Image (tube, grey):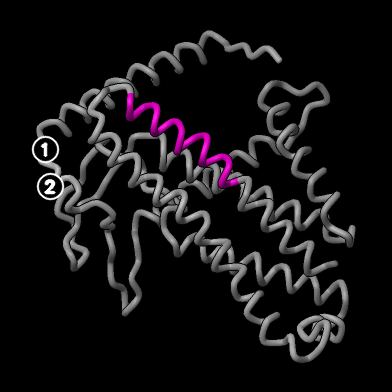
């Protein structure tokens, strides 16, 4: 398949790549002048605000809300499909068709193919955008003290804080998938049959079945969090150790785009698998 770009798209890509390289060069120059102890002393720290006993990461809320608004606007713009699709419509249709075929083959009760498809594709799109901007797009980092008071805001010395790099986000989606899977199972099988499944193949297995279900959202969320959160820290360390201007671009591209896409796809497919297992 041959990919072509319009004149405006070529100009945008040229400007973006130029700015990307410039930011990488400036960051490497800053890293060279900064002691390792100072750089890694705050590594992994987040802007946390205590609200009535609840610890909240404002950047997770801000960036997550921005991604949600972007997806809503995108869905609104693409609500009318043309008979002869343009490139944007063809691209979205290829993604949606691929997911629908996977879901249709996986879900035994065809009444739940469409709702499962909606859940899986929504998760995939949100997580993909989150992973990419959190691993490959220079953004804003906030330095705060232990009380949550902002000390300074730094531009373009780090990528945007990905909502998927926050375990609260990943665990929320994993628990949501767990609840949806059991809600679908109750509607598909009936409450009595669903209740019997907890004691299958005999009542002695109830504790094991219960632990197995509780382990699903834990493993589901930790897999995504470990790859995204750990990948960001690894990029930062390797960027400091190599000190070559092209290295951060390669690392950001690999972890932000390739690994980000893979992890978004894996998370969505696991959601489909968990729903399918409850309907089987």
Q: Is residue 60 magenta?
A: no
Q: Residue at x 38, y 16 (%)?
A: 15
Q: Residue at x 39, y 53 (%)?
A: 62
Instruction: Point out which mark residue 213 bears.
Output: none
- The quarter of the rendered structure image containing the C terminus is bottom right
- Residue 249's place in the image compared with 57, above or below, is above
- Residue of label 1: 34
Question: In whole angstroms, how far apart are the C-alphas of marks 1 and 2?
Answer: 7 Å
- Residue 5's place in the image compared with 165, above or below, is above
**Secondary structure mostly taken by the magenta-highlighted segment of the chain:** helix
- The quarter of the rendered structure image containing the N terminus is top right
- Residue of label 2: 38
Q: Is residue 21 left or right of residue 125?
A: left
Q: Identify the image quadrant of residue 136.
A: top left
Q: Nearer the viewer, residue 158 or 237?
A: 237
SS at badge 2: helix
- Residue 93's place in the image compared with 183, above or below, is above
Q: Residue at x 27, y 58 (%)?
A: 47
Q: Is residue 173 left or right of residue 168?
A: right
Q: Position of residue 44 (x, y in %)?
A: 28, 54
The residue positioned farthest toward the bottom in the image shown: 203
Q: Is residue 46 left or right of residue 30?
A: right
Neighbourhood count class around disc 1 (C-alpha, 10 Å): few under 14, some 14–19, many 20 upward = few
How many numbered markers are drawn? 2
Q: Nearer the viewer, residue 66 or 57?
A: 57
Q: Position of residue 22 (x, y in %)?
A: 27, 21
Q: Which residues are magenta?
A: 247-264
Q: Nearer the viewer, residue 102 or 119?
A: 102
Q: Residue at x 39, y 32 (%)?
A: 251
SS at badge 1: loop
Q: Position of residue 4 (x, y in %)?
A: 62, 11
């Amino acid at each position: 398949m041959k990919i072509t770009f319009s004149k405006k798209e070529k100009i945008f890509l040229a400007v973006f790549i130029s700015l990307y390289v410039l930011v990488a060069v400036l960051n490497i120059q800053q890293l060279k002048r900064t002691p390792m102890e100072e750089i890694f002393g705050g590594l992994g720290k987040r802007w946390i605000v205590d609200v009535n006993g609840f610890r909240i990461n404002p950047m997770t809320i801000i960036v997550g809300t921005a991604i949600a608004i972007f997806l809503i606007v995108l869905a609104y713009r693409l609500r009318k499909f043309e008979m002869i699709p343009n490139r944007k419509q063809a691209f979205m249709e290829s993604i949606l068709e691929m997911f629908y075929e996977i879901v249709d083959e996986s879900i035994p009760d065809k009444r739940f193919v469409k709702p499962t498809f909606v859940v899986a594709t929504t998760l995939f799109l949100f997580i993909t955008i989150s992973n990419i901007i959190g691993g490959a797009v220079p953004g804003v980092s906030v330095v705060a003290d232990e009380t949550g008071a902002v000390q300074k805001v730094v531009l373009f010395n780090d990528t945007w804080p990905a909502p998927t790099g926050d375990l609260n986000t990943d665990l929320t989606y994993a628990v949501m998938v767990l609840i949806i899977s059991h809600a679908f199972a109750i509607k598909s099988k009936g409450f009595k049959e669903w209740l019997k499944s907890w004691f299958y193949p005999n009542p002695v297995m109830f504790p094991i079945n219960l632990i197995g279900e509780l382990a699903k959202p834990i493993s589901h969320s930790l897999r995504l969090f470990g790859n995204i959160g750990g990948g960001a820290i690894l990029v930062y360390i390797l960027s400091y150790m190599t000190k070559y201007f092209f290295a951060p671009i390669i690392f950001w591209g690999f972890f932000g785009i390739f690994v980000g896409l893979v992890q978004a796809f894996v998370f969505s497919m696991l959601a489909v698998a968990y729903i399918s297992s409850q309907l089987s």
